[in-house]
Image (cartoon, coloured by chain):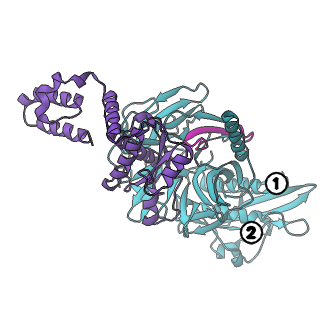
């Protein structure tokens, strides 16, 4: 797993800028370098300019990572699974992509720790099958303003997309849409129903 | 081949979207008292034809007045006499019953039409305040009852009534395992509901054009939120916003030429203004937070909207051409869905209280007015002002069902309207 820590690295350098003016220039240079280098450890600062990877774009670097990861897993190089074969994968409880719903707290779009492994599995599947496309649907519970919830649903779907890309999927494999509170899976009005409705669903397009 | 299948699919979907008429009538329940209300009596109108009268005109007027919270209607069981014109009234009787104003009238057949007359009487002076005669067809008897209600309301309170208006809402129901959404318009007292759109995907956020001839709304018929404008009379509809991301929350400018809308581009949800004729789209807000639910001030210069840029949803306002948004609400951790009164002086919104989400009204004066809660549910949402600013229509729950209700800004009157087996949501009051 790579690069999950980028936001933390940046916040660390921001804290340092508070400590004194003398440090400021170094920290700014350092944080820019960290950003370009995909957030390496602070000790790597001096070597950043010498890294051959620096001319590659982030996407290119990710693509290389994905290829290597796929090789490491010994995948046969199938770019797409569809039809009955995809259906079987989606329905098989032992398949890594059988779980396709993640849940959220009220008014939150933060992916929960317990759902990370689900998203990692989908990201790996997408990385292994570069022609596979999915739609992430964001949903909310029924409380509050429907239009606000529509935006909140999109924020949830976007958070899932970001996580999938972080774990190795390509951004262009993932479409994001929101239904807000309009498509509940549970029609009840209690926390049990609400917690089931605050969700993002990963929809495999050829399903 | 694939194209043909897709074409057939679209044709099937279009067939489902064709306008249809619904038979379900809404049931009205009135709750809450009316303490400071004007005591009135609406005497049953005399009927000059055979059999039962085609409509109980007095009942329609009485229900209308009661619903505003500004009138208390004397129950018929307490009537001592049933006069039908000024000359028959013994005013001392009504004074004894504590009634301030009396409404009397007649309905008579007149060829294939009906002659309807009413008089509004002052019980203390015994004088006639207003009155009128109409000649109408059977279909217009309810409408003329609303027109009479408007005249009575204005004569007694000095401001126009809003009885002869309509409401729009979305109804959802499960039919044979299939979920169905319908866009419905009905009279303001919830009678005569007409379905103007049916879809197998969600519909939301109906918004009346200022002249009442069109509805803008959000449809998910292409499995994403897109904005449509539909001419109510012809049923013709046009998709006006369908870009990448969210297209939602349409609100007409007071001149009817522009729509304020919510769009998300690259995951950032902001307010835009769409020129309906030209299709030009102008950005109004630009912030990484959620900005949505735009609504225009009546002068067309400001747009109110919901934003969580302060950490939780609050109401802000911004110039219709953009600028720096100003925060409007500060009380409470959740204020959303702004609706501005037609005089621009009040803001109705969803306000989270300890008891849940309720409708609250805030005075928009320079001092930052206080917030007054006017509904009593725990999941109340989507407030919409009556065109005379005296009532607010909203979505609420009754016995676990999603229904719509009205609350008076004066007094404690609240009314709930529901149909069996349907979830009714997102009501909007016509101009």
Quarter of the figure that contains the N terminus of chain B: top right
Could you tell me residue B429's position as x and y percent?
60, 50
- The residue that appears at 42% across and 60% down in the rendered structure is A195
Q: Residues within 10 Å of mark 1 (few under 14, many from 20)?
A: few
* Rendering colour (chain B): cyan
Q: SS of the residue at dot 1?
A: helix
> Please, what secondary structure does the residue beneath circle 2 have?
loop
**Front residue of this view, candidates B148 and B141:** B141
Residue B269: horizontal and vertical position, in percent?
43, 38
Of B324 and B120, the residue lying toward us: B324
Relative horizontal placement of residue B310, taking residue B380 as reference (left or right): left
Magenta span: B216-237
Q: Is residue B92 above or below residue A110?
A: below
- Within the image, what quadrant is residue B224 found in? top right
Q: Is residue B236 within the magenta segment?
A: yes
The residue under the point 22% across, 23% down is: A52
* Residue B334 horizontal/vertical position (percent): 38, 53
Chain letter for the residue marked with disc 1 in the picture: B
Q: Chain of mark 2?
A: B
Can you identify the residue that label 2 sits on?
Answer: B43
Q: Position of residue A44 (x, y in %)?
A: 13, 31
Is B186 within the magenta? no
In the displayed structure, does residue B111 sit left or right of residue B374? right
Is B298 in front, or is B180? B180
Q: Which mark is residue A99?
A: none
Label 2 vs 1, first from the N-terminus: 2
Instruction: Read off the residue under disc 1.
Output: B139
């Amino acid at each position: 797993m790579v690069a999950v820590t980028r936001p933390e690295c940046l916040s660390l350098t921001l804290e340092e800028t508070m400590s004194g003016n003398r440090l400021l220039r170094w920290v700014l240079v350092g944080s820019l370098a960290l950003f370009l280098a995909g957030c390496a450890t602070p000790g790597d600062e001096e070597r950043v300019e010498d890294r051959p990877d620096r001319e590659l774009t982030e996407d290119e670097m990710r693509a290389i990572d994905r290829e290597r990861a796929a090789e490491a897993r010994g995948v046969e190089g199938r770019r797409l699974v569809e039809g009955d074969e995809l259906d079987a994968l989606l329905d098989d409880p032992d398949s890594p992509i059988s779980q396709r719903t993640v849940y959220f707290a009220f008014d939150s779009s933060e992916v929960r720790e317990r759902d990370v492994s689900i998203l990692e599995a989908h990201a790996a599947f997408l990385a292994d099958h570069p022609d596979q496309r999915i739609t992430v649907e964001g949903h909310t519970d029924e409380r509050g303003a429907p239009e606000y919830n529509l935006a909140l649903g999109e924020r949830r779907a976007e958070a899932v997309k970001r996580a999938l890309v972080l774990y190795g999927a390509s951004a262009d494999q993932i479409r994001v849409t929101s239904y807000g509170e309009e498509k509940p899976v549970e029609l009840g009005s209690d926390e049990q129903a609400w917690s089931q409705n605050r969700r993002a669903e990963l929809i495999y397009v050829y399903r | 081949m694939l194209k043909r299948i897709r074409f057939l699919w679209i044709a099937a979907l279009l067939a489902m979207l064709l306008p249809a008429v619904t038979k379900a009538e809404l049931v009205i329940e009135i709750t809450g008292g009316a303490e400071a209300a004007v005591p009135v009596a609406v005497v049953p109108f005399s009927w000059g034809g055979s059999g039962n009268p085609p409509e109980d005109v007095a009942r329609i007027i009485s229900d209308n007045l009661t619903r505003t919270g500004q009138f208390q209607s004397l129950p018929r069981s307490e009537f001592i006499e049933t006069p039908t014109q000024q000359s028959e009234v013994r005013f001392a009787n009504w004074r004894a019953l504590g009634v301030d104003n009396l409404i009397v009238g007649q309905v008579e057949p007149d060829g294939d039409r009906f002659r309807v007359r009413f008089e509004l009487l002052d019980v203390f002076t015994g004088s006639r305040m207003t009155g009128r005669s109409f000649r109408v067809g059977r279909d217009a008897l309810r409408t003329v009852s609303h027109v009479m209600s408007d005249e009575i309301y204005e004569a007694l309170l000095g401001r126009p009534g809003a009885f002869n208006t309509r409401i729009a809402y979305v109804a959802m129901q499960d039919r044979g395992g299939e979920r169905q959404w319908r866009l419905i318009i009905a009279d303001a007292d919830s009678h005569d509901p007409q379905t103007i759109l049916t879809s197998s995907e969600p519909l939301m956020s109906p918004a009346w054009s200022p002249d009442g001839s069109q509805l803008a709304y959000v449809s998910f018929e292409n499995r994403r939120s897109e904005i449509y404008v539909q001419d109510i009379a012809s049923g013709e509809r046009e998709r006006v916003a369908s870009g990448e991301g969210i297209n939602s929350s349409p609100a007409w400018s007071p001149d009817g030429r522009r729509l304020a809308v919510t769009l998300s581009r690259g995951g950032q949800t902001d307010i835009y203004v769409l020129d309906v004729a030209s299709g030009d789209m102008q950005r109004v807000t630009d912030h990484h937070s959620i900005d949505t639910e735009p609504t225009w001030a009546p002068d067309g210069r400001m747009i109110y909207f919901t934003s969580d840029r302060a950490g939780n949803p609050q109401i802000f306002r911004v110039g219709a051409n953009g600028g720096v948004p100003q925060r409007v609400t500060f009380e409470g951790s959740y204020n959303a869905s702004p609706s501005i009164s037609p005089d621009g002086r009040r803001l109705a919104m969803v306000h989270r209280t300890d008891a849940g989400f309720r409708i609250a009204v805030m005075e928009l004066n320079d001092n930052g007015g206080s917030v007054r809660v006017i509904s009593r549910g725990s999941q109340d949402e989507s407030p919409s002002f009556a065109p005379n600013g005296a009532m607010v229509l909203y979505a609420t729950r009754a016995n676990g069902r999603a229904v719509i209700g009205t609350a008076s800004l004066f007094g404690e009157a609240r009314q709930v309207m529901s149909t069996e087996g349907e979830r009714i949501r997102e009501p909007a009051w016509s101009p």
